[in-house]
């Protein structure tokens, strides 16, 4: 592990630890903090030896006091982490020693400010929740681009392995091709099962919005599978099957924020089986993505160039998703001599960690390292906002479920933010297919 990776991992542990603290306090020690019994509905019973922090219960729906206080603690954790990482994005770009050290001070600062935020007004953190909802849209875009990038890389690396296997075995072995097909079928099956569940449950497709959204997802996903498999595009079927599975989940997750009961059976419940399942999947996916960011650092920036070389492939050895190779031979591909022109243009070598180079000395005039540090901390600030939304069912500021009271507008906003990010994700993949078609035509 490099020093840069260790620093990123340390900040990730700060992030995880703060949210775990907020969740544990909200679930197990709530009464000791707010000084009221969470079993009361219309009135409060004071509890001895409690902190009696009334600010956490302000503007809460009396029917959902427990959910409201738990959510307000999560907002406070998300807020301090967002402010901390925004500050680190500026400071760490000038001081690499601060980025890599002073961990005791960082822990004390975050946890101390988090506790002091308990006494802050809920109105401020309700406003922060609205800002976090919008900023989470940009995290969803980054997440979609990473999924697209990884899917492309999986296709290219597996096909590279299969080609090498054929050369070495004289065409008699097909282990890597079988693995390619198994992974493809696995993702395709997940997409089909999820889609079947959506159509089979009238709770999601029983309204015009739900039916329309699910059908659009179905048509776009299958069109991308067909286009990718065409000889004129020649991008295989693994990538679009990964897209299909991801899109099916994204549609379902978006509908879980819908305030209409006909589109979302869970809209009248503060907690439900589907919401818990979605929370588990999203948390697992987010952890994988964040660990991937920790491991790869500045290479993550390559997701913003569809025609560039993928993040995994950069580490693997330079087999581009849209290969414009100086050496088109199989040997050139396998040895990494055929690196993409685009990868060269953006200035990334295939086997270095930019923040550990001498060129990445602290300061704004250095190259690579300060930009990587700034990008990582901005990404963590967005991830903090996104976690605040995920852990509170996308910003239930007063504890109420989606269809109760004033929260219906926020639920609809959350649903459309998720859907728009998905549709932009679809357009990006269409663009990737178009570039692949141009490459095939120019061969």
Image (cartoon, rainbow, N blue to C red):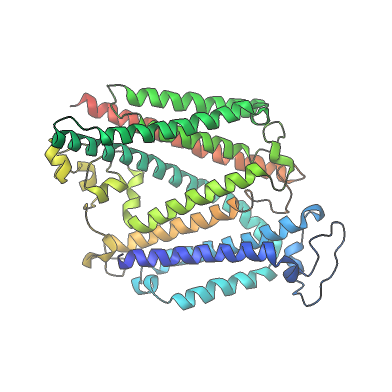
- Can the viewer see residue 327? no
Above or below for 203 versus 21: above
Which of 33 and 115 lies nearest the eye of the viewer? Answer: 33
Where is residue 362 drawn, in percent x and y? 30, 70
Q: In the drawing, does residue 196 fall left or right of residue 370? A: right
Quadrant assignment, res 427: top left
Quadrant assignment, res 214: top right
- Can the viewer see residue 270? yes
Q: Which residue is drawn at 37% across and 33% down?
A: 182
Q: In the drawing, does residue 205 fall left or right of residue 336? A: right
Above or below for 425 versus 105: above
Q: In the drawing, does residue 380 fall left or right of residue 415? A: left
Above or below for 120 versus 312: below
Quadrant showing the N terminus: bottom left
Where is residue 52 drawn, in percent x and y? 77, 72
Q: Residue at x 81, y 55 (%)?
A: 62
Quadrant showing the C terminus: top left
Q: In the drawing, does residue 374 fall left or right of residue 157? A: right
Q: Which residue lies furthest to the right in this view?
A: 43
Q: Residue at x 70, y 36 (%)?
A: 265
> Count of labels shown?
0
Q: Which residue lies furthest to the front in this view?
A: 172
Which of 228 and 201 lies nearest the eye of the viewer? Answer: 201
Where is residue 383 drawn, in percent x and y? 50, 55
Quadrant assignment, res 414: top right
Q: Which residue is drawn at 76% across and 62% down?
A: 57
Where is residue 366 drawn, in percent x and y? 27, 65
């Amino acid at each position: 592990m490099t020093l840069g990776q260790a620093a990123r991992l340390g900040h990730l542990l700060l992030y995880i630890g703060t949210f775990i603290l907020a969740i544990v306090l909200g679930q197990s020690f709530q009464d000791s903090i707010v000084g009221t019994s969470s079993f009361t509905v219309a009135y409060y019973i004071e509890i001895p030896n409690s902190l009696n922090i009334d600010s956490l219960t302000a503007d809460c729906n009396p029917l959902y006091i427990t959910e409201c206080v738990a959510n307000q603690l999560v907002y406070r954790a998300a807020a301090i982490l967002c402010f901390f990482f925004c500050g680190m994005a500026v400071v760490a770009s000038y001081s690499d020693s601060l980025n890599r050290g002073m961990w005791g001070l960082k822990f004390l600062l975050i946890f101390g400010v988090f506790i002091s935020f308990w006494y802050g007004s809920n109105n401020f953190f309700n406003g922060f929740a609205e800002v976090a909802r919008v900023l989470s849209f940009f995290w969803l875009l980054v997440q979609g681009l990473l999924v697209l990038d990884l899917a492309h890389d999986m296709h290219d690396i597996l096909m590279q392995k299969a080609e090498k296997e054929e050369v070495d075995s004289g065409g008699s072995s097909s282990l890597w091709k079988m693995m390619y097909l198994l992974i493809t079928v696995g993702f395709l099956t997940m997409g089909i099962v999820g889609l079947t569940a959506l159509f089979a449950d009238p709770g999601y497709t029983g309204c015009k919005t739900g039916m329309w959204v699910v059908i659009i997802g179905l048509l776009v996903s299958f069109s991308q599978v067909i286009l990718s498999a065409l000889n004129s595009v020649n991008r295989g079927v693994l990538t679009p099957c990964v897209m299909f599975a991801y899109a099916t989940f994204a549609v379902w997750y978006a509908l879980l924020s819908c305030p209409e009961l006909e589109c979302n059976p869970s809209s009248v419940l503060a907690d439900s089986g589907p919401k818990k399942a979605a929370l588990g999947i999203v948390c697992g996916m987010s952890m994988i993505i964040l660990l991937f960011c920790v491991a790869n650092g500045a290479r993550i920036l390559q997701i913003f160039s569809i025609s560039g070389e993928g993040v995994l492939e950069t580490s693997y050895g330079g087999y581009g998703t849209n290969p414009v190779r100086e050496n088109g031979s199989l040997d050139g591909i396998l040895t990494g001599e055929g690196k993409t022109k685009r990868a060269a243009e953006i200035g990334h070598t295939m086997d270095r960690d930019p923040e550990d180079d001498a060129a990445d000395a602290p300061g704004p005039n250095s190259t690579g390292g300060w930009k990587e540090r700034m990008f990582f901390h901005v990404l963590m600030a967005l991830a903090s906002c996104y976690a605040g939304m995920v852990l509170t069912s996308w910003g239930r500021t007063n504890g109420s479920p989606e269809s109760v009271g004033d929260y219906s507008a926020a639920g609809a906003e959350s649903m459309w933010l998720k859907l728009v990010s998905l549709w932009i994700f679809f357009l990006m993949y269409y663009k990737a297919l178009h570039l692949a078609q141009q490459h095939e035509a120019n061969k």
